[in-house]
Amino acid sequence: MSEILLQLLLDIVEGCRLPVLRKNQEHEDEWPLAEILSVKEVSSRKLYYVHYIDFNKRLDEWVTGDRLDMKKLQFPKKEAKTPTKNGLSGSRPSSPEREVRKSLDLNVQPATAPSRGKTLPTPLVFSVYVVISHVVLKIDYPMSFHCLQTKVEAVPLATQVSPATPVPSLPSSAEASQASVFPANGTARRLVPSQPGRKRKANCGGAEEDSQDSSDGIPTAPRMTGSLVSDRSHDDIVTRMKNIECIELGRHRLKPWYFSPYPQELTTLPILYLCEFCLKYLKSLKCLQRHLTKCNLRHPPGNEIYRKGTISFFEIDGRKNKMYSQNLCLLAKCFLDHKTLYYDTDPFLFYVMTEYDSKGFHIVGYFSKEKESTEDYNVACILTLPPYQRRGYGKLLIEFSYELSKVEGKTGTPEKPLSDLGLLSYRSYWSQTILEILMDLKPDNGERPQITINEISEITSVKKEDVISTLQYLNLINYYKGQYILTLSEDIVDGHERAMQKRHLRIDPKCLHFTPKDWSKRGKW
């Protein structure tokens, strides 16, 4: 038997699938199915790079032969030849990436704009009554069933977060209806109308972030399944494998999650050293020490536009500080699977958050945004470095991006699709922000206070589509006896209050010194 297993080990090639031993989150042994992506030999010992099927790529790793279940080895199979568009036949070996892509294509259908000449359904006006602390609010809001249905399908955040997330079904007939609030768990609270919004392309902007707590109904841990990926242009064997073993950045050593296109000669090093101020990469500790004697930076280049306590934000122009921006992108790619790496950083601004001590300003995280965005994106990529995750910095980055949008007088939204961690943070931030607005509403001179989705969007600078999708995600919209109602239970209120008590880091608008530029004028670049 041992000779047979030894022969099977010798026969393992790329594309084989078999169960592999790993530890789960409870540190218990499990044997998930995995695909062999690469095989190498180190000191006369074979190592296998495995991707766990239906798990996030950040869990991929090199394993030894004793962790493989050879009894259930599956060799690569070719798909049956099928005619192509040109009438030619062809076959391709199966792989988990193609299966993921197929499932995404089946589940996520981009919404298409209505053809010219076609009439849209007549907009309906919904009167939504909201009861908050014994105060009744009446909200009148126009909505088109057709546009709302289109938006529910088009916004990945509303449809892809979880298959189990209930979304209220919308009636197909265009009948005007009036909404009232009914109690949930004995208490009735709050509101919701919806509004059509223009559709956007699904871009590959990722956001790797953390969720600080679960008391507001938002998950605190990343999904173990794959990220929300719509573009697999990097679907080759090289970029599917992590190529950097370890990064030393200041006092931290980071283990990368994903591939990053650092120079090939650096990928064989046990540790890649980075200067934590200019982010230059070096091959040895001695080179780093020599570099630090010459590097005069003690903070990111660019303008400091915010400082409160030890937290600072620096605005960095991708054209004026090209080398720093490119090095930042290389570092970020180690932790962002969805990021498209731009060597041409000219069209982007980078906002780097730092923590100050006696040695300088240490990078905590960053987000980037386009200088000119036709789609109203206020974030292209966002990242909190792993040593600082789950400490509230993720929401602080998100809050800062919306504070900039407020100064610019715009509403903004992050590029889609978001990564799993980014989705958790944005959902949590949107939920807390919207609930904070609604629960602070008070009667005005005995009159019932009124608020609309537009007003919520203007106050928070959150796009109307994100406001609507968040309300749907929290399952607060209900259709009852021909009416749309929104109920806010005591559990939601209590969870929100507990979450806000834990959220100590907040942006102070008084400490922000930021003047928007008109980037439509080329001279500004």
Image: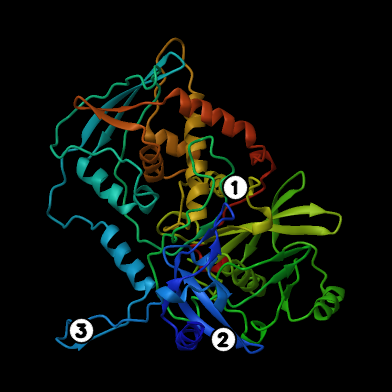
In the rendered image, which residue does mark 1 sit on? 400
Query: Label 3 is placed on what type of residue?
Result: Lys
Residue at screen point 47% across, 73% down? 69
Q: Position of residue 271 (x, y in %)?
A: 72, 76
Q: In the image, is residue 484 above or below residue 135?
A: below
Which secondary structure, mark 3? loop
In the rendered image, which residue does mark 2 sit on? 40
Report the mark closest to the observer, 2 or 3: 2
Residue 370 appearing in the image: yes
Residue 87 image-quadrant placement: bottom left
Report the side of 26 relative to 118 (left or right).
right
Pick whichever of labels 1 and 2 is earlier in the sequence.
2
Pick whichever of labels 1 and 3 is earlier in the sequence.
3
Task: In this rendered view, identify the residue nearer to me: 194 or 55.
Answer: 55
| Labelled pair 1, 3 in contact (Cβ < 8 Å) | no
Task: In this rendered view, identify the residue nearer to me: 226 or 234.
Answer: 226
Query: Label 2 is placed on what type of residue?
Result: Lys
Report the side of 128 relative to 286 (left or right).
left
Q: Position of residue 450 (x, y in %)?
A: 39, 23
Query: Label 1 is placed on what type of residue?
Result: Phe
In the rendered image, which residue does mark 3 sit on? 81
Question: Quarter holding the C terminus?
Answer: bottom right
Residue at screen point 83% across, 70% down? 296
Q: Position of residue 309 (x, y in %)?
A: 77, 43
Residue at screen point 48% across, 31% down? 435
Distance from label 2 to label 3 (Cα)?
Answer: 32 Å
Report the mark closest to the observer, 1 or 2: 2
Q: Position of residue 80 (x, y in %)?
A: 22, 81
Q: In the image, is residue 516 above or below residue 458?
A: below
Distance from label 1 to label 3 (Cα)?
Answer: 53 Å
